[in-house]
Amino acid sequence: MHTFSQELDAVPPYSFELTVHNPAGWFWHNPLEVYEAGRIWTALHLSLGKPVGLRLESLGSLEKPKILATIFSRHKLTNREEKEVIEMVIEGAGLRDSILEFYEAVETDQVLKHTIHNLYGMRRGAMLRTDIFNSATLAITLQNAPINRTDQMLQLLITNYGEKITFDHKTTYTWASPKSIMNADEKELTEKCKLGYRTKYLQFIAEAVTNGTCPTIKELLEMPFEKAKAELTKLKGIGEYSSEIILPHGEAFPIDIWSAQIFHKLFFPHQPLPPKQEAIQKVRKQAAERWGKWRRLAFVYVLSDLTNISKKLKINL
């Protein structure tokens, strides 16, 4: 096994643990990653499909952050491939993101001001935001499903169609590649991964990604938020909720009826919850007015600190 290591700086304050090991239980890269004592191991595909293992660990502190990234590969990587992984880590771990501007913008917000101390230095850690198909896979499996069903589908997809990699005495998996899903037998994919109606949408997007008719994350990021959302919703199976899970923009606010109930209590504590779609649109509008370009990060901070917010505001969330 070949290895390549590089130390990376982050914009302080930066909490490695909160970023890659989210308090809400969300995974950083995929559900089968391994996190132990301040280190995380995961596996990913390079742009040409080559699988590699990745270990990240913190060497610094909150105010002087430094991350050590170690890449494991069966064959020696080229300089270009090494750079590709490092760029994915920088983006996926939010190492270049400045958090202080966000804190300044929300320091008087009646909800978010309670989260800053508990989550100080946390970024929206999401390696998903570097890959359109992985993000779309998550979005589709979240549709009309409680979290345990989503977890079940994702784990079955990854273990049946991803690549198993053992490195550094750890075993994990890559996400299923677009080609592996596109070429899978529809009936077998549905049954093995318990996808139901979602199979046809996942295979459609896999084909679009493989054929280059689906925009990349980079292309989406270069578009204004509303235009990027419109581009995504042209894809079969991608509506407003799913598009906002996928979009890398700070304005995205991926609200479903579960999270709408939480935010409705926070925004309108003395008002009854309206019907489902009305509640979602009402909450989405309020979040845009209240948090503007910071609403994606606000979404993450609130859902990562529900117990604390409940106590501070005396609201049962």
Image: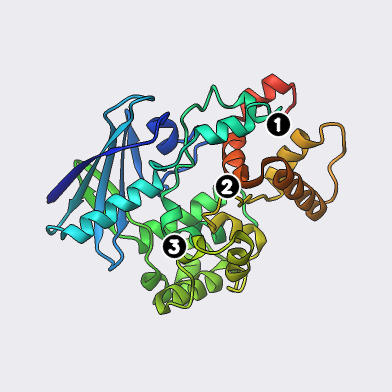
Q: Name the residue under label 3.
A: 218
Look at label 1 and name its amino acid: Leu
Element assignment for label 1: loop
Q: Mark 1 points at which residue?
A: 317
Q: Which of marks 2 and 3 is in front?
A: 3
Residue 286 seen anywhere in this rendered image of the structure:
yes
The location of residue 225, given as percent across then percent down, is: 60, 59
Identify the residue shown where x is 29% and y is 27%: 60
Residue 155 seen anywhere in this rendered image of the structure:
no
Placement of 80 over or under 293, stated as above or below: below
Q: Whole-Å distance between the Cαs marked 2 and 3?
A: 28 Å
The location of residue 223, given as percent across then percent down, is: 54, 64
Closer to the camera in the image, 233 or 220: 220
Placement of 311 over or under 71, stated as above or below: above
Q: Name the residue under label 2.
A: 147
Pointer 1: residues within 10 angstroms few (<14), some, or many (20+)?
some
The location of residue 222, given as percent across then percent down, is: 50, 63
Left or right, 265 with respect to 213, comes to right
Q: How many marks?
A: 3
Element assignment for label 3: helix
Placement of 287 over or under 139, stated as above or below: above
Placement of 208 over or under 54, stated as above or below: below
Of the image marks 2 and 1, the number of the one nearer the N terminus: 2
Look at label 3 and name its amino acid: Lys
Look at label 2 and name its amino acid: Ile
Of the image marks 2 and 3, the number of the one nearer the N terminus: 2
Left or right, 185 with respect to 105, comes to left
Residue 189 — which label? none
Identify the residue shown where x is 58% and y is 68%: 232
Identify the residue shown where x is 47% and y is 55%: 154
